[in-house]
Amino acid sequence: MLTDPIADYLTRIRNAIKARHRVVEIPASNLKKEITKVLFEKGYIQSYKFDENGPQGSIKIALKYNPVTKQPAIVKLQRVSKPGLRQYAGAAEVPRVLSGLGITIISTSKGVMTDKEARTMNVGGELLCQVY
């Protein structure tokens, strides 16, 4: 049994990028689906598909690479809040990643969103991960 499914999700994506895979399949949950949607909206992944086979279902993510240099769109994918030490921030304290070049994905009372959207909506929440 996994103690941190979000860390497992991020690790599967990191491992697939290091192995230069085009597609990675991950067990689904509602939070993972929302994180996947944010990654797609911000251009870090090429596409995604939710499969509802079985009781849990799965997420198929097509990773994005530069067509010329073959470099991945995701350089770093890091978990911030862990089960042993949850990290929360108010709207004013939400950290910026690389001076705004990266994103922090936050779980708020209004849903899963990026740090910029959280500041605009003036909501805080749990800092899930940072991507750049």
Image (spheres, grey):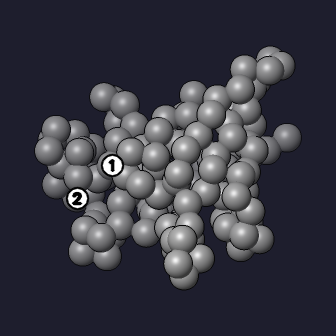
Q: Position of residue 109 (x, y in %)?
A: 33, 29
Quadrant placement of the N terminus: top right
* Residue 85 image offset from top left, x and y in percent: 54, 56
Q: Residue at x 47, y 58 (%)?
A: 44
Q: Nearer the viewer, residue 128 or 18?
A: 18
Residue type indicated by callout 2 = Glu
Numbered mark located on residue 114 in the image: 1
Name which residue lies at 73% across and 43% down.
Answer: 26
Q: Residue furthest bottom?
A: 69
Mark 1, residues whose alpha carbon is within 10 Å: few (<14), some, or many (≥20)? many
Q: Quadrant of residue 63?
A: bottom right
**Residue bearing mark 2:** 93
Alpha carbons under labels 2 and 1: distance apart: 13 Å
The x and y percentages for residue 121 are 16, 38
Residue placed most toward the observer, 78 or 101:
101
From the viewer's perspective, is residue 33 above or below residue 3? above
Decide if residue 80 is on the left or right side of residue 95: right
Between 19 and 34, which is closer to the camera in this rendering? 19
Q: Is residue 85 above or below residue 96?
A: above
Residue 127 makes an appearance in the image: no
For numbered disc 2, what is the local secondary structure?
loop
Total numbered circles: 2
Residue at 71%, 52% (x, y): give it: 23
Q: Quadrant of residue 130?
A: bottom left
